Image (spheres, coloured by chain):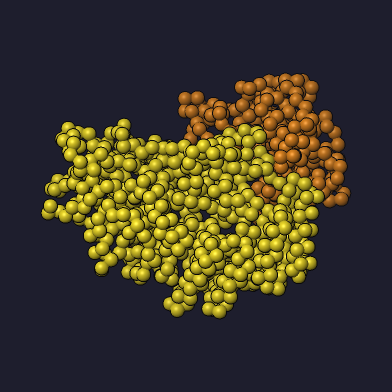
Amino acid sequence: MKKILVPIKRVIDYAQKIRVDPTKGPQGVQLKNVKMSMNPFCEIAVEEAIQLKEQNKGAEVVAISVGPKQCTETIRTALAMGADRGIHIETKPDVRGDYIDLQPWAIASLLKGIVDKEDAVDLVLLGKQSIDSDCGQTGPLLAGLLNAPQATFAANIERGDDGSFTVERETDTGTETIKLNASGKPAVITCDLRLNTPRYPTMPNIMKAKKKPVETISLEDMVKELGLDLDEVLTPKNEVVEVYEPPPRKEGETVGSIDELIGKLKEKGLVA
Amino acid sequence: MRRLQQATTSSLSSSLKRRALCPPTVHATAVLSVMHQRRLKQHLIPHYCVSLPQLRYSSSPAADQASRLPSDFLSILQQNHPSLKISLNKYELDAHGHGESHHPVSPPDAVLYPSSVEEIQDILRLCCREIHREGDDVPTVEIVSVIPYGVGTSLEGHLSFLFPQDSDDVVEIPSSLFESNNDQDKQLLQNEKKKVRIKRKGGISLDMCNFQSIGELTPGDGFIKVGAGVTRNSLNDALRHTGMQFMIDPGADATIGGMTACGASGTAAVKYHTMRENVLGLTTVLPPQLIASDTHDSDSRSKPSAVTCGSNALKNSAGYNLPALFIGSEGTLGIITDVTVKIYPIPSHVIAASCTFDDLHTAAEAVTMIRMLGIPVSRIELLDKISIRAFNESVKNEELQPMEEKATLFLEFSSHSESSVIADLSAAQAVCVDDLSGSNFVSAGDEVTRNKVWAARHKLYYSSIALRGGDDDGATSQSTIVTDVCVPLSSFADIISATAEDLRDLGVFGTCFGHAGDGNFHCILPLRPDDTDEYKEKVFKVIELMSERAINVGGSVTGEHGIGYGKKSFLTQMYGYSGVSLMQTIKSSIDPWNIMNPGKIVDVELDVGATKKKSNE
């Protein structure tokens, strides 16, 4: 196995409380002075890539991210976990990655260009969705653009000696097993929660990561290099109309007896 | 009856020596009978555990009863702090009245969820207040008890609300202790004293879940400042990409504030020690020194102070060791709001191992020898054969292999260097196998296999309970007593073996296991509803014998779980009257009105220079 690409996204840390400024309309989600981290599903994808690399000596893991200059830190995190090198497509500071400006179609287009440029890519591993936009589209769109086999919501991945991938896939009703045959195209797999537990890198690995190569290229230059249209990339296909905090949960009612409970349920039309 | 009379006729300014603890001899069944129906299982408890010295303390009645708080207490707070969440929900009150032990539930009258130090200062100030009620001859000083709450995993009744007995007697308190500032009272201030009655008016739980801050980690530093409500797992999760981790690992995912208050530690203590050695500093809100006036002026001079103590430096010999005072204080001295804790680099290489021994004593000797030879271990746990039996019973349905039913040592070695861990492993193996005839020494380096090697240790708690469970009337975690002692290493082998023998001789079901490298071992003693009183007495006997042996060798009656009220009676045996008396002095001077978690660790009478006057004088 030669090369595994892992696109990763820098998002608001999952443990942070999201703040919405109601005066800012669609741009209401506060990004300033908020702790940012690698998207948890991307972490799982990186971990899976490292495990596959450990099982297949000689494989190279490349971490890719599109975002402001702080994305290099996110890439360093992937390098500390064991990725070999990084590619950072740097956007201007005011370009938002949380669905406002950059959306899956643009990302998938950029990634397709990178896959073609890199050549000999066996596998692209992505998180199943990002926790800010929750789209879950980048993986499937990329597979479509590449005309490549895909499997989403992977809970287990096994690589065959013939270069095929057998994926156990999470669905609402159970697990489905899909085999992606070796096709000359990279397999595109998106990763779900049960796939693995991402490792916590040790200090020596964090320090080694500082020396691993990260290629930084501006979005504008990358777009030009790939022959894409900058406007196309930066104009979102979907417009965010409104952003608001969910209404606070209403307090429940305490009832004194089963009869009272049934009475209330009937009152609310919840039982006949 | 006679004891009750003694309590009310003794002067409030009596010397602290007379407040020495005596082991409670009162049966607490009357108290149990008013417990909430859902807590029926508490009836299982041997008498020692329910050491509510009934004549001096009462526990709260079932949560169905009316609030005992002063009528305006919550409304004043809500008015001054509209965003402060207050809950009177019966289930939340109940949940905040117990930890994870067998000790009876005693809920607060309200649960408050503060978000700032200022809110806590205002809350505590209101907990000791002078109230003038119509028709009363003298004002009343109303005292509300406070217990801070993390995630409720404490084990010795720390969270049960206990209330010192009230009396109707009028007492005279020095006027300098009152914050009141209106003209009428200025005349009183010139006199020395003021006549009041003192009444306890219920209790509140301060849930610290809003204190979730995690500070910035400066590269090169080995510490981090966190809010008291941060749990240890969420702290480590936040640190996951820094290469550092917080290494203290008690079984529960406890809050850092709670771990500080209870002096917690776990299996990693043999390498990384306990909270006592890992707290560099903390901020705590102290209870009020003065009695607040009836006016709700939040600028008043009686506002309780918030103290930040300690230093980010690893060594500090500047002044009294204030953080040490609060570590292990179990909520009796103040409300901890944030803690600066040490963190350590994740080791690059880890090897786990296990070894079987013919008897518990020999296994314990192996531990002592490993420690005496200076072989570094990162974890070393000893399980007796009953623990292994419990594990074997529990794996019947799983892929794990049952183990040989003998005393077993579980070891772990970690280091930055692979050759170093391998050398440590070999040295320990030589001790276990060559010197002490241990057998079946297995080791593993990769995480998956390491977890399999240690499975019996990881599953110990629930598999021990399951030994007496399995049916509707089986033991559960609420009916299981978990107790621990800690002794010098030289006595460890003898004492853990003696306890295992007691279990056998008395026919008590239980597992003995321990953090052997520290001389600390636990007993898990599951109880069932159909256990006879005779059986429960035997369980009590095991614990009593264990504790006495520990004290006799200069050890501690609790290495990790704390005193709460469950083990108060042992403090005098451990520290003598003068030691306990010094603790009472500290408690009385920091918390003169006994607002903070009364009835835990030490008992105190109000020692504010008050003299009791009969009401007709």
Q: Is residue B232 left or right of residue A123?
A: left
Say whether residue B162 is left or right of residue B410.
left
Q: Nearer the viewer, residue B466 or B359?
A: B359
Residue B599 in view of the camera? yes
Residue sitting nearer the eye, B267 or B64: B267
> Residue B53: horizontal and vertical position, in percent?
35, 64
Q: Position of residue B140 (x, y in %)?
A: 21, 47
Q: At 80% across and 50% down in the image, what residue appears? A: B419
Residue at horizontal 38%, vertical 37%?
B305
Q: Residue B495 versus residue B223: which sits nearer the camera? A: B495
In this view, B318 is above or below B87? above
Look at chain A in the picture and name its colour.
Answer: orange
Number of labels in the image equals: 0
A50 sits left or right of A120 in the view? left
Specify whether residue A270 is in view.
Answer: no
Residue A266 on image: x %, y %: 37, 55
Chain letter for the yellow part? B
Residue at 69% over, 70% down: B362
Q: Where is the N terminus of chain B found, in terms of image quarters?
A: bottom left
Q: Residue at x 68, y 41 (%)?
A: B243
User: Which quadrant of the figure has residue B73?
Assistant: top left
- The image quadrant of residue B244 is top right
